[in-house]
Image (cartoon, helix red, strand yellow):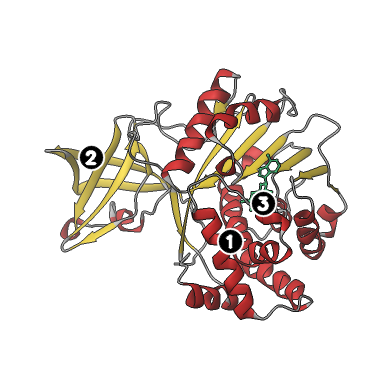
Amino acid sequence: MLKNPDLLLKKLYLSIDRIIQDINLPKEKIATYVKMLSDIFNRNDEQTINYMQSNVLRIAYLIYFYPINVYKCLHLIDFYYQYFSNKKAFLDYGAGPLTFYSACALMNLEGEKFFAYDKNQDILYLGKSLIKDLSFKLYNKMNFSLPDEKVNVIFLGNVLAELEEKNITPFLEKMIKMIDMENNLLIIIEPGTKKGFKNIITAKQFLNRRGFKFLNACPTEHCPVDENDWCHENIPFPRSTLIEYIEQKTGLNNKFINFSYGFFSTNTKKAFVFHENTFKVVSNLFVRKGEYAIYLCGNMGIRLFSILKKHLNELNKEFKNLSRGDIVYIKNFYQVSNFYRLDVNSEVKIIKKFRSSNFS
Ligand SMILES: C[S@@+](CC[C@H](N)C(=O)[O-])C[C@H]1O[C@@H](n2cnc3c(N)ncnc32)[C@H](O)[C@@H]1O
C-alpha cells in the first residue's frame, strides 16, 4: 500500500487543480485572499469575522492552508498507523474542507462511518468533491452531521486555536460525550506556536483527569518543556506551483511547517516504550564547524547532545541523519558541563523516523 506522504500530497494537488479549474478566480486574486486569511489567523484578538462564511476565503483556505494541514495528518497517520486499527466510526469536528478525511482517503484508512461537522457546513461541501476524487469508498461513508452513535475516533484540527482559552475545557467535555469509552482515539492538532502547544497541554491535563492517556511518542510522562518554550514538529513542505506563486506574491512562507499535536485514548496502549537510552529528537540538527549537535528529550529531560565530525564512524554515523520527531537509541555518551558528548565508542540507532518520506 502506498503510504509515502510526499507522493500522496502530489495526488492531492492534482485533485485540487481539477476543482479550481471550475472556479473562475485569477491567481492574483487567490493570492490576495490567502493573505487576507493569513492576517485573520495571525490576529491576536478574538476573531470578529467568521472567515468560513465568505466564499472566496473558503477557496483561499482550500488552496493554501488545506494541503498544509492534510500533509501534517499524513505524517501523523503514517507514524501512528497502529493506533487506527479496529476503528469504525469517526468524527472530524471543525472539519473545514475535510482535511483529516482527505488524509484518511489518501492513506486508505479503514472505517465504516465518517461524520463531519463544522459550524460552517458550506466548507464541508467544498471538500466533498475532493474526497470523491480521492476515494469513492470513503466518500460513500461520509455523513455531514453530528454522530447519532458513539464514535471511536474524534479529530480536532486547528479548532482549539479558534476558541477562547476559558472555553477549551467545556468544549472537550462536549467532545468526550460523543466518544466510545471502550475503544477510542482523540487526536488534536494545533499550530506549532507557543499558544498551540499550551492548548495541547491544557487538553492533556483535562483529558488525563477523564481517564485518557497521552499516547504521543514522548519519553516521559512529565513534559520537561519549560513554561516559556514549546514543543513542536517542523517538517519541510513540498509546495505546488500555485502555492509557490502565492508565497512569491504575499511574502508568506511555509517552506517548513510547524505543528504540535496530541493523541489520547482510554484504552489504547502507547506504541513506544522508552528505555534509559532512548530519546525523542526535539530540535533540528545544528551543523557546526567540525561538529553536529541536537536536542534530545529523554528520562532526564531535554539535553543537548553533540559529536565531533572526526568521531563519526559506522556505529554512530546515523547521528547526522537525525531530524525532529525521530526516536533514537544512543549508547555510550558522557557529560561535559551542561551537554552530552558522543565519541568513537558511541552507538546511534534510529528506531523510527518521524518523516518517512524523502523530501528535503
Ligand atoms: C482553521 S479551520 C481548520 C479546519 C480543519 N480542521 C483543518 O485542520 O484544516 C477551523 C475550523 O473550525 C471550525 N470551528 C471553529 N469553532 C467551531 C465550533 N465551536 N464548532 C464547530 N466548528 C468550529 C471553523 O468553522 C473552521 O472550519
Residue at 60 percent of width and 19 percent of height: 211
Residue at 34 percent of width and 33 percent of height: 227
Count neighbours of disc 3 (C-alpha within 10 A) and say few if under 14, some if 14 to 19, many if 20 or more: few
Dot 2: element: strand
Query: Dot 3 corresponds to which residue?
Result: 50
Mark 3 within 8 Å of ligand 1, using the beta carbon: yes
Outermost residue toward the left in this view: 337
Between discs 3 and 1, the one toward the N terminus:
1
Disc 2 residue type (three-letter): Asn
Query: Dot 2 corresponds to which residue?
Result: 332
Q: Nearer the viewer, residue 227 or 49?
A: 49
CA gap, disc 3 to disc 1?
11 Å
Position of the N terminus, as image quadrant, is: bottom right
Relative to 111, 281 lies left or right: left
Relative to 108, 294 lies left or right: left
Residue 162 in the image, given as x and y percentages of width and height: 59, 44
Dot 1: element: helix
Query: Dot 1 corresponds to which residue?
Result: 37
Q: Quadrant of residue 134?
A: bottom right
Image vertical order of residue 100 relative to residue 152, above or below: below
Is residue 288 in view from this perspective? Answer: yes
Between discs 2 and 1, the one toward the N terminus:
1
Position of the C terminus, as image quadrant, is: bottom left
Disc 3 residue type (three-letter): Asn
Q: Which of labels 2 and 1 is toward the front?
A: 1
Dot 3: element: loop
Count neighbours of disc 1 (C-alpha within 10 A) and say few if under 14, some if 14 to 19, many if 20 or more: many
Q: Nearer the viewer, residue 160 or 231?
A: 160
Residue at 84 percent of width and 30 percent of height: 149
Q: Quadrant of residue 297?
A: top left
